[in-house]
Image (cartoon, helix red, strand yellow):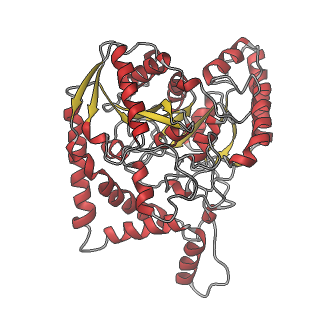
Amino acid sequence: MSSIVGLSLSELLEGLERKTISAREATRAYLDRIAALDPRLGCYLRVDERGALASAEAIDAGRLRGEAVGALGGVPVALKDIFVTEGLETTCASKILRGWIPPYQGTPARKLAEAGAVLLGKLNMDEFAMGSSGENSAFGPTRNPWDLSCVPGGSSSGSAAAVAASLCAAALGTDTGGSIRQPASFCGIVGLKPTYGRVSRYGVVAFASSLDQVGPMTRTVRDAALVLEAIAGHDPKDATSLALPVPRYRDAVGRGAAGLRVGVPAEYFVAGMDPVVEAAVRAALGVLEGLGATLVELSLPHTKYSLPTYYLVAPAEASSNLARFDGVRFGHRSEGVRDLGEMYERTRAEGFGPEVKRRIILGTYALREGYYDAYYGKALRVRRLIADDFARAFERCDVIACPTSPTTAFPLGARAGDPVEMYLADVLTLACNLAGLPGLSVPCGFSPSGLPIGLQLLGPALGEEVLLQAAGAYEAATDHSRRRPPLG
């Protein structure tokens, strides 16, 4: 592995600022590694080599002139293909958007560019962010760098695998029900879902608008803090964006765990959990306790309703959001149709994959006249109860610790024929989204076969700093985040 791509984002940034590494050198090193390894991994849907090198050279020239080049000046990053990028194809890994070149730049992409990050390209994902394995992409699956026969998790599959395989210094993902944290766990990296509204969703193709959130996927906790600083903040173009100042998140990473009250919810150690996962997470709790934290046993009784609640709320919102993809304004349009109705029907039948169709049907059913209150309305009421559980829990603790996923990464195809079993992969991450809270996954061990395991930390609203504090302390006391996949 090149010495440059072996660096964390923080280490690379230090070299860039000291001018011992140029942005062009860093970008070229990542582009070469992508060319060598990505044919096996399937992380990238498109690489913008020309644009990346041009951006890197402009940053180098600005830095030589003594100009401010941004907090991430020269750092090569990549974006999940759900982020709208002006002039660069955005597909959400769906045939229905193949060939769509957006005429505008979304806020997360714009903020990274303003911070001086170099965009390498767009990353693979489950179609329209609907999936937990990375197998639902219309353009082929992404593979787990730790074991190419296994899934990387989803829906931010390409983001997680690319960071783990050192095909970018950092990536952005989206998390609607665990789509940052679960693949971060499967790929042995750090994934942070911020508080709902902390990062703008303008220019993020919507799946479930009340649940979607943007966050960083990185190799280290400090790296996640640096990226979050760059992308967080109020955006008048997003009505759900919080008008609050952005803390200096990096300062929280080194505060240590002494004095923290760490809640351990009984409901998150579920029946059927892989005993290797539970053992690793229990050991991680012991590490935190050894660092001066106090463990607090607690209960989140409505957690058991998270899965059915999520699979009413999210598909209902998806059925509304995805109605805009009809072949009229942009994206795929079926040819040889006789009338408008046939165009709608054939365009959507040809453009959407099986999982997207399944969720649109579920959501449309739940919103039908006469069924709305029985299904969607009731789910919203249960969602409130789940949020209330967390509010009471955080009166007794500062942060909650639990597994990110009940298992390690599973083999490609193992759950493809059973949607319910696939949905259970996110059973431990869904409640966080329903409550709008921040959550983070940090590596906490490996299975006997060498697959990563993630420790999930959940915080109160706007509690990103305490998550970074606890995760940073744990990371510094262990070596799990320093291990790399055996890719060469």
Instruction: Say which quarter of the image contains residue 78.
Output: top right
Instruction: Say which quarter of the image contains residue 466.
Output: top left
Residue in front for this viewpoint, 456 or 99: 456
Instruction: Say which quarter of the image contains residue 429.
Output: top left
Q: Seen from this angle, which residue lies furthest bottom?
A: 338
Q: Seen from this angle, which residue lies furthest front?
A: 448
Residue 333 on image: x %, y %: 63, 73
Residue 454 on image: x %, y %: 46, 35
Q: Residue at x 52, y 43 (%)?
A: 183
Q: Residue at x 62, y 43 (%)?
A: 147
State whether residue 58 appears in this view.
no
Q: Is residue 418 above or below residue 256?
A: below
Residue 277 on image: x %, y %: 42, 37
Residue in front for this viewpoint, 343 or 361: 361
Q: Which quarter of the rendering shows the C terminus? A: top right
Horizontal arrangement in the rendering, residue 83 relative to residue 323 (left or right): right
